[in-house]
Amino acid sequence: MAKKNAKKSKNSSASIARNKRATFDYKFEEKMEAGLSLMGWEVKSIRMGKVNLSESYVFMRDGEAFLFGCTIAPLNTASTHVVCDPMRSRKLLLKRKELDKLQGLVDRKGYSIVPISMYWQKGAWVKIEIGLGKGKKEHDKRDDTKDREWQIEKARTMKKAVQQ
């Protein structure tokens, strides 16, 4: 009798959703991982990939961190006795030391806390990567775009030179 391999292949992605706009609008100085307090219907919707992080942000209230603006669309087959609110604020699970650090930097230095990506950890836990940073100015965004285009052009030129 053959044993089934319980491990997933390393090529399979554990990523659920990415906030691509965040890396364009903010310069992150620090990133950290946080757990997410979810209801059962939300986990089922996340497994189906019905998550949008594009307009979301993290705010601090009463010494706790909350994710606001993250849309998790309810499934049609969700339970009828549960009221599904796709835009509710969800509590982030962080240690007290991390919460105090975030609160201090947001209050004193004017940093913003923005979710970068949502992913599965060990196949069962939903984690969210949050970034602590400041907003970019318009000229910073243009510089980043120029640098990215230059890197692409340089790679094309090098590829052509190697082929000849």
Image (tube, rainbow, N blue to C red):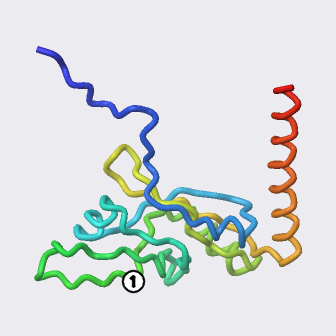
- Which residue does the image show at 24% across and 73% down from the upper left? 75
**SS at mark 1 in the image:** loop
Residue density around tag 1, few if under 14, some if 14–19, many if 20 or more, within 10 Å: some
Left/right placement of residue 74 relative to residue 156 reads left
- Place of residue 145 in the rendered image (x, y in percent of width and height, measured from the top left): 81, 63
- Place of residue 161 in the rendered image (x, y in percent of width and height, measured from the top left): 88, 31
Left/right placement of residue 136 relative to residue 3 reads right
Left/right placement of residue 8 relative to residue 112 reads left
- Place of residue 57 in the rendered image (x, y in percent of width and height, measured from the top left): 56, 77
- Which residue does the image show at 38% across and 57% down from the upper left? 126
The quarter of the picture where the N terminus appears is top left
Q: Nearer the viewer, residue 142 or 92?
A: 142
Q: Nearer the viewer, residue 153 or 124?
A: 153
The quarter of the picture where the C terminus appears is top right
- In the picture of the structure, the residue carrying the numbered disc 1 is 87
Which amino acid type corresponds to the residue marked 1 in the rendered image? Met
